[in-house]
Image: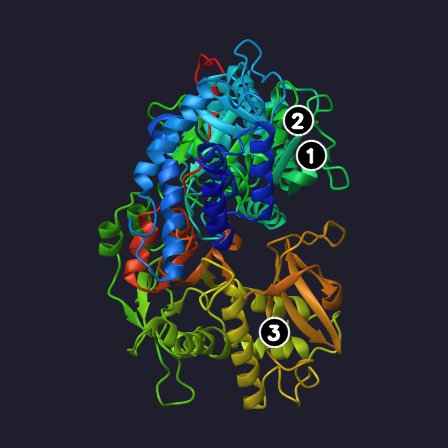
Amino acid sequence: MSGGSWGKLQAYALEHGALDEIDRVLIGTLAAKARREDDLAFHIVLACLVAAVRSGGLRIPISGRGLELRLEEWLRALYSAAARAQGVDPGPASFPEPRGQALSMTEEFTAARLEGKYDAVLGRIDPATGHATPFLPLIHSGDGLYFQRHHAAEALAGARLRRLLDAPDLPFTAAEVDRTLETVLERLPLRLGPSADAPPMAFVGAQRAAVVIALRKRFTVISGGPGTGKTSLAANLLRAWVRLWGERAPRPPRIRLAAPTGRAAQRLSESIKRSLGTLIGAADGPDAESDALVGRLPCSTLHALLRYQPATGDYFHHAHRPLPADLVLVDEVSMVDIFLLARLLDALEEGACLVLMGDMDQLPSVEAGSVLADLAPAGIAGNPLRDHLAILDRSHRSDASILEAARGINAMDAEAALAAMPPPLPIPLSPSSARSLPSWPVAFREEGKTLCPGGGCRFVVPRGVGADPWRGGLDDLLESWIEFHYLGRPFDPARHPGRELATPRRAAYTETIASLCALPDAADARLEPLLGEAFAYVDQARILTFTRIGWHGSVALNRKIGEKLGRRWDARGDGPLSGGSPLGGGLPGGAGSPGEAFPGAPLLITENDPARGLFNGDVGLHLRIAGRDLAWFRRGEGFQCHPVAFLPRHELAFAMTIHKSQGSEYDQILLVLPESGNRLLFNETLYTAITRARHFAGIYGPVEVFREAIARKVIRESGLAAYLAPAPQPR
């Protein structure tokens, strides 16, 4: 094949986003170093490896049918994009046939590799040492082709995991564990809720088994979806661990809690403290001291835990300066990439215990790898981690149809997911009365249970018709949503006589914001109760999107909602943005300017700022009190504020991407689907979105796009599982 052939493919790839300029230089450099500038097969294989890494994979198959399928997929997508742009048919009259070309490229690449023609850039792993000799940019390990950096991270993580699996069990006997669990789960249990009459938690089956595993093994993986009780389990596990340790050790245990993001770390800490606040019974003596120790445990990001040094890219803690901890518990592990996992495992002290918690069905990390899915690829049966793995599959939180739809999505069964849904809901519109509200679902309490008539997982459909009714109906959708959640009083008990609301609130969101902005200063005693009300509204409902860009993306939706709220509040003459309001006359630049924060708007931090205690994913609230624009953030039982002008990068948070919502939960979510063919339409993304909802998960978009998402799983190749087998395979 001539170099010109690659030149044409490369031009297509650059034009349609399959490669960027850095990729072009990298591929060209490797081909030149290998002296294979005219080797089309080598260029295409490198392009596929680059594409896999860009989408979060660690490797691609190096030969056989696996490599052939990867090459065919890349070529087919490239030719289809080029054909659409040129307005031609992607058939053989215009482009090579992808399947045949992929087969011939696989054969040519394999033959050249076996003849050693890539040895200048492709290293092989020495089975005796597990290392590549000499150090080269590409690595052939097992049946995969890697870049050196990705293989090094996987190999380090695999070796350290193997060491944890081979470590002896903890010294606690079965009798000691049973006695401690009797105290923690039966004599001094936690309640199911904050109210004094809430029943005790019943830790049985998989939940109790998970605690037992973590009290016996030095490495434990706990996977469960939303509402399966992971954080309550963590609280009880820590309570038991502290008690068992205290019976044997002369010093208190060194326990560290961590999560991949600041927001997730904050949620874990708050959830554990909230669980401890439901303790039934009066603990005293050693029991009281043990529970108090758990309540004081700090929780940080993994980067902070390992003391990441941004200036050098190094970590303070590593194998030669290990983390001083007897137990490390990490939540939201699905968001952890292979590089950070390797660093964490490398920094563990000899004999330390590690507990990883998360949801293996959620979206994997933004960066490389799918750690939790690799550790629990097909559940417990046949898994080399079966003695270290607990899977929680019973949710105690979400509506039944949400759970059933989620199961159908996980099983890639669109028919089952659709069958679990109630009939579609037309966009609720306000009746003629100005004081009436659109009829979105509202949750009530009946006989100790929460019910949401009209809720569950269901499609929300436009009332109009036309060439693109979904895009055309977006304004009606947003008008209805903000009228219900931000302007109206749907949760006022006076509107629902004879029924007990699950979340009663007498004031509308806009009235709460006006009250906050009318305070004479930030020291007013009314501030914290009003902030609690405002954040309860903000955290109750959220619009979720697959992307940031496009008419269906979070940026466009936030802009539209900002414009609508600013315009509506100004027009009312009594809202927080009105000229005569305590805020002093609206926004600089006009209410709802694109991307502009304004008083009353929720904000999403998109950049870490450890000095201010703000992290990517934090959600705050913009208020103007006594002429000062301040952003308030919930912190434990209280709040902290910062001048809006000094915040790190941030954006409006009426809508956010599904990635940003990971780890959060809302009473109601509204998911706006993108157009067919969107590159982020994945099964895991859809699952993550609808499982953020407790009572109502509305889906706005064509059912064909919903089916398309269910049918596409995230494919991230890795070789991590090979390190977990009892007898390590030669590398």
User: In terms of sequence position, does the residue under pointer 2 or pointer 1 come before the other?
Assistant: 1
- Residue 339 in percent (x, y) is at 59, 34
Q: CA distance from mark 3 to mark 1?
A: 37 Å
According to the picture, the residue beneath numbered tag 2 turns out to be 347
- Residue 36 in percent (x, y) is at 53, 30
Identify the mark at residue 378; answer none if there is no mark: none
Mark nearer the viewer, 3 or 1: 1
- Residue 243 in percent (x, y) is at 59, 28
User: In terms of sequence position, does the residue under pointer 3 or pointer 1 come before the other?
Assistant: 1
Residue at the image point whose x is 41% and y is 77% from the top: 480
Kindly identify the amino acid type of the residue bearing the numbered disc 2: Ala
Kindly identify the amino acid type of the residue bearing the numbered disc 3: Gly
Kindly identify the amino acid type of the residue bearing the numbered disc 1: Leu
Most foreground residue, 629 or 554: 554
| Crowdedness near tag 3: few (<14), some (14–19) or many (≥20) residues, C-alpha within 10 Å | many
Residue 194 visible in the displayed image: no
Q: Quadrant of the N terminus?
A: top left
Left or right: 61 as drawn, with respect to 30: left
Identify the mark at residue 306; answer none if there is no mark: 1
Left or right: 55 as drawn, with respect to 594: left
According to the picture, the residue beneath numbered tag 3 turns out to be 600
Q: Is residue 552 above or below residue 225?
A: below
Most foreground residue, 55 or 403: 55
Question: Are the two marked residues, 2 and 3, in contact with CB atoms closer than 8 angstroms?
Answer: no
Query: Quick one: SS at disc 3?
Result: loop
Q: CA distance from mark 2 to mark 1?
A: 8 Å
| Crowdedness near tag 1: few (<14), some (14–19) or many (≥20) residues, C-alpha within 10 Å | many
- Residue 74 in percent (x, y) is at 40, 43
Left or right: 370 as drawn, with respect to 132: left
Question: Are the two marked residues, 2 and 1, in contact with CB atoms closer than 8 angstroms?
Answer: yes
Mark nearer the viewer, 2 or 3: 2
Most foreground residue, 507 or 86: 86
